[in-house]
Image (spheres, grey):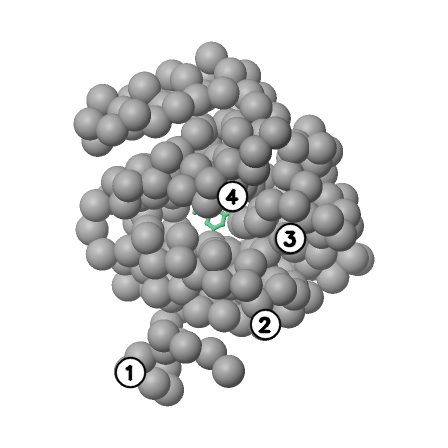
Amino acid sequence: MKTPSHEVIAVVGGTGDLGNALARRLARSGRHVIIGSRTAERAVAAADVLSAELGVKVKGDSNAAAARDAGIVLVTVPYAAQSGTLLEIRDFVRGKVVIDTTVPLVPPKVMRVQLPAEGCAALIAQKILGGETRVVSAFHNVAARKLATDGAVDCDVIVFGDDKASRQVAVELVNACGLRGLHGGALANSAAAEALTSVLIFMNKAYAVEGAGIRITGRDTWETIQ
Ligand SMILES: NC(=O)c1ccc[n+]([C@@H]2O[C@H](COP(=O)([O-])OP(=O)(O)OC[C@H]3O[C@@H](n4cnc5c(N)ncnc54)[C@H](OP(=O)(O)O)[C@@H]3O)[C@@H](O)[C@H]2O)c1
């Protein structure tokens, strides 16, 4: 079977807060989006809402079928669902770039950093999907409720991954969503962004902020990396 184009993006778990907001922004940017769900009907219903709102066709399907038909696969499910979901799509993502957004929050103490023994959720994803799949991680530090609007989001997104070309694919998707994507180095470095999410959740509460985010300073333009 021909490998699907990078223009076709599956959002596994795209019925949820982060996935739906990203699906919406990507569809608006002209990408072909397939929303994935454990239940194809739920995915189709979410896709139909976006199609009607945006005036472009958004598809919906099961997580596995969405992953199969896409060139790039975004995974947007809770930490507790990460392993099961990745096992569901594993056979359909070999050779593809998978962008994992999982933050290893362990309720009820979500304001406390609780990284897994493996190091971080992104490393768990790579282990489950295997070396033939190029895992990158991103979007840990941006609030879904901000992405769900048409407005500008005052926030950078750091992208992690062991393969620079795959990170660049994700950086371009971040940019397509209207945010600045920045290379953050190795997949293991994802631990830093995953940990930071608990800090931001704490700050949201402590300072009564709706979706604190991060900005990297030091240069005006960050188009190229060494
Ligand atoms: N929300 C944010 O602001 C935000 C920001 C940065 C990063 N993140 C990270 O992004 C990921 C998604 O967050 P979210 O807030 O979008 O999650 P969510 O809305 O709670 O869930 C996303 C989707 O995952 C599926 N799901 C839920 N529980 C599941 C289970 N037990 N087993 C299998 N699938 C399940 C559901 O899809 P179906 O029922 O349709 O299958 C659901 O719509 C998380 O890891 C989170 O830490 C979130």
User: Visible in this render: residue 60?
Assistant: yes
Figure check: 57 above or below 117 = above
Q: Are marks 2 and 4 in contact (CB under 8 Å)?
A: no
Mark 2 vs mark 4: in front: 4
The quarter holding residue 24 reads top left
The quarter holding residue 26 reads top left
Question: Which residue, given by chain and number where applicable, does mark 3 sit on?
Answer: 134
Question: Which residue, given by chain and number where applicable, does mark 4 sit on?
Answer: 72
Q: Give the CA separation, mark 1 to mark 2.
A: 20 Å
Mark 3 vs mark 2: in front: 3
Q: Nearer the viewer, residue 207 or 226?
A: 226
Identify which amino acid the numbered label 1 is placed on: Asp
Q: Give the CA separation, mark 3 to mark 4.
A: 10 Å
Question: Which residue, given by chain and number where applicable, does mark 1 sit on?
Answer: 220
Q: Are marks 3 and 4 in contact (CB under 8 Å)?
A: no
Which type of secondary structure does the marked residue at label 4 adopt?
A: strand
**Label 1 CA crowd tier, 10 Å (few <14, some 14–19, many 20+):** few
> Which label's residue is closer to the chain start, 4 or 1?
4
